[in-house]
Image: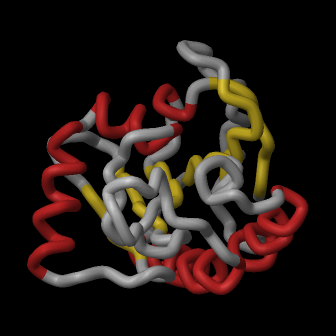
Amino acid sequence: MIHEVKGDILLSHAQVIAHGVAPNDRFDQGLALSLREQWPAMVKDFRHFCRAMPLKSGDTWVWSGAINKRIVNLLTHEALHSQHNKSGRANAEYINHALSELRYLLENERFTSLALPRLATGAGGMDWHVVRPLIEHHLGELALPIYIYTQYKKGVQAAEPRPR
């Protein structure tokens, strides 16, 4: 069940937070920056993993450090090609593949809830009217609450409906 909410995704009660990044992302803008500030070990682990086993656009990478949440990095953007690029662009093909992997992960790991932003619409440059139907297609039939944070409000706990 998909619920649109407003607030600070870092304050979500969801078991999993997913967000979009590039394969060699610097986590220097938007939600990625907030995640880096909250959990710097995640970015260090991501960089280490990318050097050891290069990720490609469309993949997912899950981090579960010393927290009770899992952070799913959806590689919805193309790789950065230089230090001067702020972010690679996202596209529907990468988003589709990453959401398919996310669905598989959610079903097989039996997670209880998911929070995600308006995926790939900030630094990724995608139109929400293109991305929202992709999320509905891949995740809409899952039997767990999915909270889409449609509007960021720093420090505000969203009203996330509880499962029945």
Please tell me which residue is depicted at 51% across the width and 55% down the height of the picture.
19
Residue 130 position within the rendered picture, expressed as x and y whole percent measured from the top left: 85, 68
Q: Is residue 74 left or right of residue 7?
A: left
Residue 150 position within the rendered picture, expressed as x and y whole percent measured from the top left: 76, 39
Image quarter where the N terminus lies is bottom right
Q: Quadrant of residue 136?
A: bottom right
Q: Is residue 115 left or right of residue 108?
A: right
- Give the residue at the far top of this rendering: 155
In the rendered image of this protein, does residue 83 appear above or below residue 134?
above
Please tell me which residue is depicted at 59% across the width and 81% down the height of the picture.
94
Q: 42 or 1, which lies in front?
A: 42
Residue 59 position within the rendered picture, expressed as x and y whole percent measured from the top left: 43, 81
Q: 114 or 9, which lies in front?
A: 9
Q: Quadrant of residue 49?
A: bottom left
Q: Is residue 154 left or right of residue 29?
A: right
Please tell me which residue is depicted at 82% across the width and 56% down the height of the picture.
128
